[in-house]
Amino acid sequence: MRVVFMGTPAFAVSVLRRLVEDRWDVAAVYTQPDKPKNRGMKLVPTPVKEYAAEKSIPVYQPESCRDEAVLEELRALEPDVIVVAAYGKLLPQALLDIPRKAIINVHSSLLPQYRGAAPINWAILNGDTETGVTIQYMVSELDAGDILLAKKTAIDPQEDAGQLYERLAELGGEAASEALALLDRGEAPRTAQVYGPQYQYASMLSREMSPLDWSKPAGALVNQVRGLIPWPCATTDVAGKRWKVFRAHVGGPSGKAPGMILSADKNGIAVACGDGKSLVITELQAEGGKRMAAADYLRGHPIQL
């Protein structure tokens, strides 16, 4: 069964690697064009392109998938299945119609919950204890296709979005390979999604979500810290300096006004929250500085309580 893979970031590499390791016939890879980065604006290949080159898989990087020449090029590959994982471009119906069996997408949530751009982050921001990956048949509407299969996993209370991203990427590769096996045998099921008000759309993240509101419960602030890693990160202003907060946990009772610093020592920086509890910051990055343990920061920057 001939497979064409479409993906761009590290998440997609984990999926592609699993397909290669399971010996699926990956005929070609489509990924975003190289982009200039850093001061020299040197063109940098995508993670998927780098991996495909290592495995001698042909790589295509069209600017648009709507160009008829691009579509003809893809038709010439004669794919049985196209697997999409975080490709980063909207795909036209003409492309969706190309594969002989199906075009499937690896989505990092349990659909229909968290359709959209940032499902991993929103699962943590909302304090969910479980998430997973869904293999869905692609349709023109975003993340609305029938479900082929889904795999669940628990979310650790201290796990951040970056850590969960890596785990779901591995789980996504496992699920994609299982889906190909079902399609190859002609046994792949279809379950229609029913989207309702009980489900949340996973909108894109923004810097406006960063500031910590100390009137909120400590647990909600912990979820904000975990959910906004690696970008845009939770922030707070202390003594005229802005901090990015990378690690925190719920502390003991505070009895003080929200936002008041209760203690600053080797155990971290405890701040009063709106529910009468404290948030203990244990890892941070001050403006212009490096990411470090709060205890290390305090050695050179003592805080007036």
Image: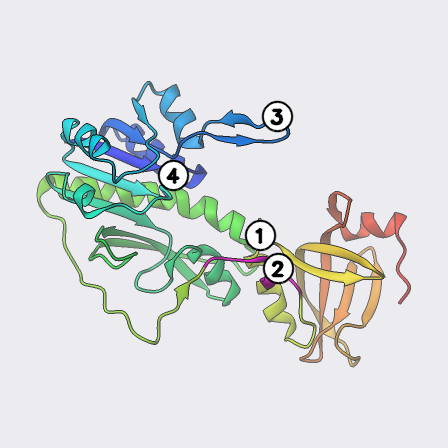
Q: CA distance from mark 4 to mark 3?
A: 27 Å
- Region in magenta: 204-211
Assign the magenta stretch its main secondary structure: loop
Instruction: Tell me if label 2 and label 3 are in contact, CB under 8 Å.
Output: no
Tell me where residue 203 appears, x and y as whole percent.
44, 61
Identity of the residue drawn at 26% across and 27% down: 28
Residue at image mark 3: 40
SS of the residue under disc 3 = loop
How many numbered marks are there? 4
Q: What's the distance in space between the residues labelled 2 and 4, CA to CA? A: 25 Å
Left or right, residue 135 beside residue 41:
left
Provide the residue designation for mark 1: 229
Determine the secondary structure under disc 4: helix
Question: How far across and how far down the image is residue 38, in percent?
Answer: 61, 31
Residue 38 drawn above or below residue 95:
above
| CA–CA distance in space, label 2 to label 3 | 33 Å
Instruction: Reply above or below: 199 against 121.
Output: below
- What distance separates the C-alpha of mark 1 from that of mark 3? 27 Å
Q: Looking at the rendered structure, which numbered label has been put on residue 12? A: 4
* Residue underneath mark 2: 225
